[in-house]
Image (cartoon, rainbow, N blue to C red):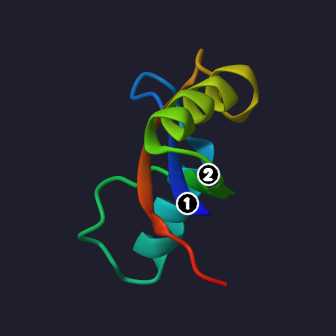
Amino acid sequence: MTKVNIYVTLRESVVDPQGIAVQDALQALGFNEVESVRIGKLIELELAGTNNEIEARVKEMCDKLLVNKVIENYRYEIGEVAGK
């Protein structure tokens, strides 16, 4: 099995209300140096196959289900074989 981490973030042009709320909360707690917060998500997968097969399938999964390409960007990392 190969571990894949997919990082999904909102496009810069999209307002991030969760990020704004966290920024406000951090500043209320005295962390005034925080100028901006953007919140994203991490999706972890374990897949079988060669790196080329996995890369193609991950792109397909992101395009079809995991990422809303209208408002989100993504990148992924294919890791080492996961031992169980």
Where disc 2 sits, the SS reads helix
Depicted 69 relative to depicted 77: above or below: above
Residue at position x 49%, y 35% in the image: 55
Residue identifier under label 1: 2
Q: Residue furthest top?
A: 70
Question: In the displayed structure, does residue 61 sit left or right of residue 56?
Answer: right
Q: Residue furthest left?
A: 33
Q: Residues within 10 Å of mark 2 (few under 14, many from 20)?
A: few
Question: Mark 2 or 1, which is nearer the eye?
Answer: 1
Q: Amino acid at mark 1?
A: Thr
Depicted 60 relative to depicted 34: above or below: above
Question: In the displayed structure, does residue 74 sit left or right of residue 69?
Answer: left
The Cα–Cα distance between marks 2 and 1, rounded to whole angstroms, is 32 Å
Asked if the residue under mark 1 is in contact with the one under mark 2, i.e. CB atoms within 8 Å, the reply is no
Residue at position x 45%, y 73% in the image: 26
Q: Nearer the viewer, residue 12 or 1?
A: 1
Query: Quarter of the image holding residue 53?
Result: top right
Mark linked to residue 18? 2
Q: Amino acid at mark 2?
A: Gln
Depicted 20 relative to depicted 64: above or below: below
Residue at position x 73%, y 21% in the image: 64
Q: Going from the N terminus, do you reach mark 2 or mark 1 first?
A: 1
Q: Nearer the viewer, residue 66 or 53?
A: 53
Q: Position of residue 59 (x, y in %)?
A: 56, 28
Q: Position of residue 77 (x, y in %)?
A: 41, 51
Where disc 1 sits, the SS reads strand
Quadrant of the frame with the C terminus: bottom right
Residue at position x 34%, y 78% in the image: 31
Depicted 36 relative to depicted 50: above or below: below
Q: Position of residue 38 (x, y in %)?
A: 45, 50
Q: Position of residue 36 (x, y in %)?
A: 34, 53
Quadrant of the frame with the N terminus: bottom right
